[in-house]
Image (tube, helix red, strand yellow):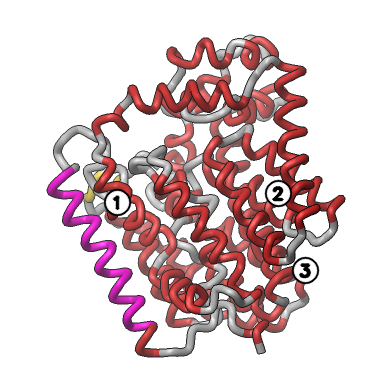
């Protein structure tokens, strides 16, 4: 049955080819990176990842190791037998526990430290006089802003500002919201999978979404929050009902106020609706996105398109101008994504690509298309282990999450990365 194929690759020889392909891609990204990147003060001395390689395993890894062991042991059973609502809650809670325990394995301060550097949104938000003034002059003042503020729409900075306004200021509350965003992303992707591929397929994928290696970065990067908002929008926009698709488009419009890169996520519901020949739903999604951006522009003075152009200029004038496009497009970005998604995801992707016309394959294939567009845009030369977090759960829908061996491999990769990589996130 078609509805039982997602996340269940069965051909052993093809799986072996996919595993070897994953290993070759990662090895090529590391080898080429050492020759072209490492030691040149480009911030990617663990190429293809940001940071540097330095073993620092400690007793703090016992907690995420225990979480992983629990998910590997009982996750597939719970996902297969529990009520659907319980599967969603368990997936979100387990994902939060996995993400938080990895982030805190080097000490609780490591949960908030990456979100409170001089490059980040939260310290800059503390300096704002008000949202109105910030939005009106956002583009003009962009050159003097921190690096991450320059790289995103104003919504990314206004989130910690709003938390402070309601008495939840500080990097701790912001970190909690980031981890919650990642949990929401996991649950939303499962909801969309159930709608399109069937409940059995979504249940099989659930444990794989929980134990993603990408959690190494999700716990300490605001991109995990962006992933959550975009995933909610995509899940709603995939509805066959036009009125619901408008709402999904509006949520995606909010997501575009957090990250410019979120625009490629429009491809996911777009592909879904076009496959249904839902032309009206596609127009509804576009209308929802355009409506949000137009209202914000008219009421605040912030133009999303002017902001995008200002960010592009800042990006071209920064360190990205010294990072070689060829390396990152061909090997660096795909290699970093391969590490964040894990080998089980690539095995699943190899299976669904072969049957890309099948309804169960549409979400991971559409996610793969979004990744390809993002890579060819040349707007991400490195750092995609966090920048591409919104893509990873959609790709991971293809992973064999009901296979405990694959879950163990995914968890082990994450633990090794956490113990070996010293990163800003």
Identify the residue under disc 1: 332
The residue at the point 22 percent across, 50 percent down is: 54
Q: CA distance from mark 1 to mark 2?
A: 29 Å
Main SS category, magenta section: helix
Magenta residues?
Answer: 15-36
Q: Earlier in the sequence, mark 1 or mark 2?
A: 2
Q: Residue at x 74, y 63 (%)?
A: 277
**Does 140 appear in magenta?**
no
How many residues crowd around disc 3 within 10 Å: few (fewer than 14), some, or many (20 or more)? few
Residue 85 is tagged as 3
Who is closer to the viewer here, 291 or 67? Answer: 291
N-term mark: 2 or 3: 3
Eyeballing the image, is 268 above or below 422? Answer: below
The question of residue 30 being in magenta is answered with yes
Q: For marks 3 and 1, give the CA distance.
A: 39 Å
Image quarter of the N terminus: bottom right
Dot 1: element: helix
Residue 291, position as x, y percentages in the image:
77, 33
CB under 8 Å between callouts 3 and 1?
A: no
**Residue at (53, 78) in percent of width and height:** 355
Give the secondary structure at mark 3: helix
CA distance for labels 2 and 3: 19 Å
- Classify 10 Å Cα crowding around label 1: few (below 14), some (14-19), many (20 and above): many
């Amino acid at each position: 049955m078609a509805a039982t194929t997602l996340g269940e690759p069965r051909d052993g020889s093809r799986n072996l080819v996919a595993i070897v392909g994953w290993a070759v891609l990662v090895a090529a990204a590391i080898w080429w990176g050492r020759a072209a990147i490492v030691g040149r003060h480009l911030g990617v001395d663990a190429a293809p990842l940001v940071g540097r390689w330095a073993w620092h395993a400690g007793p703090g890894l016992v907690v995420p190791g225990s979480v992983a062991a629990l998910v590997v042991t009982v996750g597939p059973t719970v996902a297969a037998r529990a009520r659907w609502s319980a599967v969603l809650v368990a997936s979100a809670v387990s994902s939060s526990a996995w993400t938080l325990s990895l982030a805190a394995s080097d000490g609780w301060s490591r949960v908030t430290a990456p979100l409170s550097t001089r490059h980040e949104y939260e310290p800059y938000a503390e300096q704002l006089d008000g949202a109105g003034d910030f939005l009106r002059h956002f583009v003009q003042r962009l050159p003097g802003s921190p690096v991450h503020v320059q790289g995103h729409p104003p919504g990314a900075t206004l989130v910690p500002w709003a938390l402070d306004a309601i008495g939840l200021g500080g990097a701790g509350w912001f970190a909690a919201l980031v981890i919650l965003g990642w949990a929401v992303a996991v649950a939303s992707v499962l909801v969309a999978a159930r709608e399109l591929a069937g409940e059995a397929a979504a249940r099989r994928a659930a444990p794989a979404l929980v134990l993603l290696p990408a959690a190494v970065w999700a716990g300490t990067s605001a991109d995990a929050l962006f992933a959550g908002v975009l995933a909610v929008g995509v899940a709603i926009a995939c509805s066959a009902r036009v009125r619901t698709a408008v709402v999904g488009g509006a949520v995606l419009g909010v997501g575009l106020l957090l990250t410019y890169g979120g625009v490629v996520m429009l491809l996911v519901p777009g592909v879904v609706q076009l496959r249904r020949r839902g032309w009206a739903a596609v127009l509804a999604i576009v209308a929802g996105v355009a409506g949000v951006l137009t209202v914000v522009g008219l009421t605040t003075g912030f133009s999303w398109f002017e902001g995008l152009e200002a960010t592009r200029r800042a990006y071209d004038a920064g360190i990205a101008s010294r990072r070689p496009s060829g390396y990152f497009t061909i090997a660096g970005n795909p290699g970093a994504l391969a590490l964040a998604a894990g080998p089980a995801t690539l095995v699943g992707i190899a299976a669904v690509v072969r049957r890309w016309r099948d309804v169960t394959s549409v979400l991971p294939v559409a996610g793969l298309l979004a990744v390809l567009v993002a890579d060819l845009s040349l707007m991400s030369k490195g750092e995609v282990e966090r920048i591409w977090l919104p893509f990873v759960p959609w790709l991971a829908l293809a992973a064999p999450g009901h296979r405990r061996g694959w879950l163990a491999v995914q968890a082990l990769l994450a633990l090794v990365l956490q113990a070996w990589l010293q990163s800003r996130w």
